[in-house]
Amino acid sequence: MSAALFAFFSCCSLLGTQTSVTHTDRLTECTEIYLLGFVFWGGTGILSSQPEENPHWWNANMVFIPYCSSDVWSGASSKSEKNEYAFMGALIIQEVIKELVGKGLSTAKVLLLAGSSAGGTGVLLNVDRVAEQLEEMGYQGIQVRGLADSGWFLDNKQYRRTDCIDTITCAPTEAIRRGIRYWNGVVPERCKLQFKEGEEWNCFFGYKIYPTLRCPVFVVQWLFDEAQLTVDNVHLTGQPVQEGQWLYIQNLGRELRNTLKDVTASFAPACLSHEIITRNHWTDIQVKGTSLPRALHCWDRSLHESNKNGKAPLKGCPIHLIDSCPWPHCNPSCPTIRDQFTGQEMNVIQFLMHMGFDVQKMAQQQGLEPSKLLGMLSSGN
C-alpha cells in the first residue's frame, strides 16, 4: 500500500433509511465485511482494476466499505433500552482506519476517501476527521483527500411542500434535522463552530461544510441530480412538465452551479442523473472537452506538484469544470436517456419533447429563434 489507497464509502440513498443496524455487533460486521467487498460486488468505474475503464487508478489498493449504518456515515448512537437501533457510521469509519493501519495503510503516501450519494456526503463529513485520526496515531505523512460524488445537496425550498412522512417527502433540511438527532450525528468541529447549538445539521450540506475543510476534496455533481429533484418533489415521469416545474428545474441548475463556483476541484455536467464514479460509462462524460478521469488525474498531479514545489495547478490540466448550458441533458456526453415505456434511446430534443417542453417558449425565454435553439441543443452548446 505504499503508493495510494482508496477507501470507498458505499451508499443506499441520501438518508439511507432502507436498512437499520439492530445491534452493535454490526460495527464488527461492517469492519470485517469490507475486505471481502469485491467477492460480492465487482468493481466498476473508479473501482475497476481494468486500465481501459479506470485509466489513472486501476492499480491502486482499494477497500470497499458497505453502508450498513443508515446515517450518512455520521452516527455515534449505540443500541440501548431507549434506542431500538444503533447508528454507528462515524465509528465504523474509525474502526476501519484502525484496522487498515495494521494491513499496510501505515506505509501509504495517499489515502483517498471516495463515496457516492450518501457516501459522498459521508466523505465531506469524515475526511478531516480521518486525517486527524491518522495524525493522532502518528501517521502525519499520509496525505488524506476526498472525492465526493453526488453528495452535494441543496437545502432549498421544495417545488411543492408536502408533509414529512418519509425521506422522499421530507424537505432536505427537515429530513437532516430529524436524522441527526436520531443518529446522534457527528460533524467536524470546524464546521460545527460556524453554527448555533442545535444547528449542526447545516454541515450535511456541501456548500456549507466545504469552506471549513482542511483536506483537499474533489466534488463531482450532476447539475440536475435525480435525488435532489426527488426530495424537491419534482417527478419527471413522462407526463408533460408544467412551466413552473421547468423554471424550477432551470433555477436548481443555476443554484447548484453557484454553490460550486468557489470549489477548487469540481466536475459538474448539466445532466439528469445520479452517481457517476462507479458507473462503467464514467469515462465518457465530458465537461468543456475534459473527461472526469482526466480531471481527477490533473487534480492528483496538481496536489503532488503543489506539495512538492508550492506552485499553482498545472496549465492545460483543468480541475474546475462546470457546465454552463441551462437545461437537463444539454451536454451531448450525458448518459443515455431511455423512454421508460418503450426502452428506446432518446436524444436531448426527443427527451425535452417527451417531457412536454415547449421548444418555442424555451427559445423565447432565451431570446433565440426556435431553429437556432434546436441547433444548440443538438450540438450541446
Image (tube, rainbow, N blue to C red):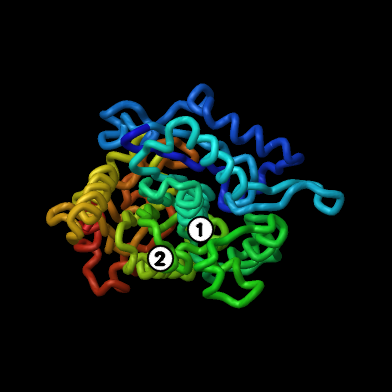
Q: 76 and 13: which one is in front?
A: 76
In the displayed structure, 323 sits above or below 19; it is below
Crowd class of label 2 (few under 14; some 14 to 19; many from 20; radius 10 Å) = many
Q: Position of residue 22 (x, y in %)?
A: 76, 40
Residue placed farthest to the top in the image?
A: 39
Crowd class of label 1 (few under 14; some 14 to 19; many from 20; radius 10 Å) = many
In the picture, residue 266 is in which quadrant?
A: bottom left
**Disc 1 to disc 2, C-alpha distance:** 10 Å
- Say what amino acid the circle numbered 2 marks: Leu
Whether label 1 touches label 2, CB < 8 Å: yes
| Left or right: 154 in relation to 88 | left
Is residue 236 in sight in this rendering?
no
In the displayed structure, 305 sits above or below 157; it is above
- Say what amino acid the circle numbered 1 marks: Gln
| Quadrant of image for the N terminus | top left
Q: Residue at image x 32%, y 64%?
A: 326
| Quadrant of image for the C terminus | bottom left
| Left or right: 323 in relation to 48 | left
| Left or right: 277 in relation to 126 | left
Residue placed farthest to the bottom in the image?
A: 196
Q: Is mark 1 on a helix, strand or loop?
A: helix
| Left or right: 350 in relation to 160 | left
Mark 2 highlights which residue?
256
Q: Position of residue 63 (x, y in %)?
A: 46, 34
In the picture, residue 214 is in which quadrant?
A: bottom left
Q: Where is residue 61 in the image (x, y as percent from the top left)?
A: 38, 32
Q: Residue at image x 34%, y 61%?
A: 327
Mark 1 highlights which residue?
228
Q: 371 and 246: which one is in front?
A: 246
Q: Where is residue 284 in the image (x, y as percent from the top left)?
A: 28, 40
Q: Residue at image x 50%, y 42%?
A: 9
